[in-house]
């Protein structure tokens, strides 16, 4: 059984034989040292989700499944007259600025639109999707999670100057009016 630290998102394995039939378990995070209280729900009728093997585990030549995040979508577009960028304000890649040139970008460790040199970041960690004036942040089932405020999220709507954290990196979303150089 796995549980994530509610403070930093680090995953911990809990020994099921020690947990037994307890409804609550508290553990001290090995990463940040803070205690986390986990409420356990055990229902016989619950469904266990099993994900397909990731691409690197299937080997070369295996068919690649296109995720729902990668499907063509006509609603996904950058807003006219506005410039959107992601700035790394804390973490190993601090100071890096990534202007959004496409309405859907992937943030991760390597081979992504926004590469972050952060060991706490998954290869394909999260996605930012722009639909006109709406900017959404979606976690891509990352190991350490995506945090908005102090909460681990699956998806969140971002506004100008919104900060979010992946791994040890804190990122800032900025939306500003695009200045026309011919004006």
Image (tube, helix red, strand yellow):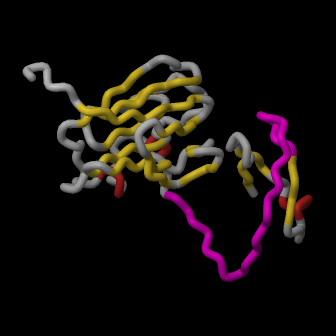
Residue 155 place in picture, x, y as percent? 48, 54
Q: Main secondary structure of the magenta part?
A: loop
Q: Residue at x 62, y 42 (%)?
A: 144
**180 sits to left or right of 26:** left
- Residue positioned 48% across, 57% down in the render: 52
Instruction: Name which residue lies at 88% across and 61% down.
Output: 19
Could one spot residue 92 in this view of the protein? yes
* 124 to 134, vertically: above or below: above
> Is 88 left, or right, of 4 in this rendering?
left
The N terminus appears in which quarter of the rendering?
bottom right
Where is 150 relative to 155, above or below?
A: above
In the figure, is residue 162 to the left or right of 4? left
Q: Is residue 69 magenta?
A: no
Q: Which residues are magenta?
A: 28-51
Examine the image and state in which quarter residue 106 appears: top left
State the residue at coordinates (31%, 47%): 130
């Amino acid at each position: 059984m796995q549980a994530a630290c509610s403070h930093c998102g680090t995953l911990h394995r809990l020994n099921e034989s020690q947990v037994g039939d307890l409804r609550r378990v508290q553990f001290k995070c090995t990463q940040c040292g803070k205690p986390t209280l986990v409420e356990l729900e055990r229902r016989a009728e619950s469904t266990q989700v099993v994900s397909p093997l990731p691409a690197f585990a299937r080997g070369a030549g295996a068919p690649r499944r296109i995720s729902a995040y990668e499907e063509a979508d006509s609603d996904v577009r950058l807003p006219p007259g506005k410039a959107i960028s992601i700035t790394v304000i804390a973490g190993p890649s601090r100071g890096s600025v990534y202007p959004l040139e496409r309405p859907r970008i992937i943030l991760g460790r390597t081979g992504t639109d926004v590469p972050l040199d952060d060991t706490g970041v998954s290869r394909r960690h999260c996605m930012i999707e722009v639909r006109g004036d709406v900017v959404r942040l979606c976690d891509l089932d990352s190991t350490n999670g995506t945090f908005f405020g102090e909460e681990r999220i699956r998806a969140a709507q971002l506004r100008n100057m919104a900060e979010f954290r992946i791994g040890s990196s804190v990122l800032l979303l900025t939306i500003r009016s695009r200045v026309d150089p011919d004006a």
